[in-house]
Image (tube, rainbow, N blue to C red):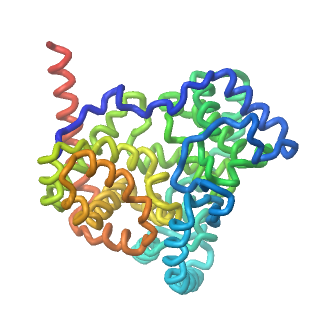
Amino acid sequence: MAKRMDLGPDSAPKKAYDYDATMTKQRVAQRLREGPNLKAASGSGAMAAPASKFASKSPAATSTTPLGFEWQDEGSASLHAAFMQRYMSILTTRAMEWSKAFPEPSRARKSRKLRQMIRLGIPHNDRPAVWMSVSGAAARRSKHPGHYTTMLKQAEKGPTDHTSQIDLDLERTFPDNRRFRDPSPQGCLAKLRNVLYAYSVHNKEMGYCQGMNYVVGLMLLVLEDEEAAFWLLDVAMDDIVPAYYLPHMVALKVDNDVLLDFMNDRLPALAAHCEALGVPLGTVTTKWFLNWYIDVMPPDTVLRIWDCLFLEGSKILFRVALASLELNQDKILSLRDDFDVLEFVKNMGRSCHDCERLMETAFSYKHLRRKHMKKRRSFHSDALAEAKRESSQQ
């Protein structure tokens, strides 16, 4: 398989810009204070934002998704529209099946039937209730009334170790989404700040890491409830995904190695090809794990992934990674340069509008279960710890 790359501190998510933190914080604060009086589209004082696959290059090319994302060009919008035209009848049928099987989505209990239906996709209107229920976030929220408000008030008393970085990242979050251009106190920008501030105080060990802003941002777009997003984030960090966001990022390094193992087992030709070319796949798959496929695949596809993630845990991240690689295997095998392979793998998810095909492939791997994942993680964690001990003794 490809060389195991060093994902040490130098490979942690980098700051995309070197803006002055104080100036940026003041700008964000000003946007939040001015509220409706500040036009979301004002260009003179707006911070330049990184380009995204959904960002429109011109007003004429703009096409907006139901969640508020804008496609990069008419081609992407057309591809998505063509898929949705075929997919809409499936969505309608499944919505009817959901209403019959689970007339009260918030009361849905884990079962084989529920798992089967979630794998086929949760109706969008039911997502908030189902995500909160199956993840355990709703139960945790009910056990700790007032806690979110307390954490937020504590965070707002003064700067913490994380507030300046959070402020830097606020305007970088979904610049391609119209809902994140609303500067009012009720807008997504203010809610995102609140959740990240509160969580950095609530979980002092983790605090804040770049990448969390995108995760919480999408949670807010779906849940439309900042306290619900706080508790869903808390459960996800504790019980659903590994500790990717801790400063040492050991869990992220381990899971990159685990994915390489699964590739060797299930996609041996592709694994051998990447190894022969010396392709450092970890430079791409790090983002897959850290962002849960946000800004990697179209938003509707990401939602289908998250439906399963909140019920079945982080094994879904591996299943989707393998499925994406398998569906693009022929193209990757045809490439003979390591750079070409890396660039293709980096961008291939952008055209993954057919979430049905992706998820069907992801669940075709019959022997990728939690116990297999746990065994591989244990092996690579031990290997990493041993390598660290040997390095310290030299």
Quadrant housing residue 256:
top left
**Above or below: residue 53 compared with residue 9:** below
Total marks shown come to 0
- Name the residue located 62 percent from the left edge and 65 percent from the top edge: 65
Q: Quadrant of the C terminus?
A: top left
**Above or below: residue 102 compared with residue 370:** below
108 vs 379, nearest the viewer: 379
Tell me, yes or no, if residue 195 can be seen here: yes
- Name the residue located 83 percent from the left edge and 42 percent from the top edge: 38
- Name the residue located 50 percent from the left edge and 36 percent from the top edge: 210
Residue 47, image x, y percentages: 66, 35
204 vs 172, nearest the viewer: 172
33 sits to left or right of 28: right
293 vs 345, nearest the viewer: 345
Work out which residue is located at the far right of the displayed protein and give it. 37
Residue 344, image x, y percentages: 32, 54
**Above or below: residue 352 compared with residue 52:** below
**Above or below: residue 101 compared with residue 119:** below
Residue 272, image x, y percentages: 12, 53
Quadrant housing residue 331:
bottom left
65 vs 372, nearest the viewer: 65
39 sits to left or right of 9: right
Residue 259, image x, y percentages: 25, 50
